[in-house]
Amino acid sequence: MFELLVLIGAGIGGFVLARDFVRRRLRFVDAVHHPLAPLAAGLGAAVLAWPLAALPLITTAATTMFGIGTGLGTRNGVRLLKSGD
């Protein structure tokens, strides 16, 4: 049960952190509008979080979910920038 909470928290945390980072910091960076930017952000986040899987409570599924959440958050942040919000 606890692993499921960690998994959900990693996905939501990656999403929120990436969306806010794109909206605040990457607002004027043209590269974030490239269609492969969310994929690159998600893969990068998953690879960087992967060594945390050596900890007892964090699994590779959680690091993968963090990467997926980061990619989706990046895509959502770019979409919000395009809409003007």
Image (cartoon, rainbow, N blue to C red):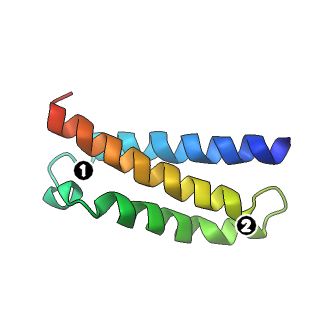
Residue at (54% x, 71% y) in the render:
47
Residue 43 locus on image (x, y percent): 46, 67
For disc 1, the marked residue is 26
Residue 44 lies, in percent from the top left, at: 45, 68
Question: Is residue 81 rendered to the left or right of residue 77?
Answer: left
Q: Are marks 2 and 1 in contact (CB under 8 Å)?
A: no
Q: Position of residue 14 (x, y in %)?
A: 52, 48
How many residues crowd mark 1 within 10 Å: few (<14), some (14–19), many (20+)?
A: some
Q: Looking at this rendering, what residue extends furthest in the top direction?
A: 85
Q: Is residue 13 left or right of residue 36?
A: right
User: In the shown orientation, is residue 2 left or right of residue 37?
Assistant: right
Numbered tag placed on residue 51 in the rendering: none
Secondary structure beneath dot 1 equals: loop
Task: Give the Cα distance between marks 2 and 1.
Answer: 29 Å
Which residue bears the numbered disc 2?
Answer: 53
Please rate how many residues cluster around mark 2, counting C-alpha atoms within 10 Å: few if below 14, some from 14 to 19, many from 20: some
Q: Quadrant of residue 41?
A: bottom left
Q: Quadrant of the N terminus?
A: top right
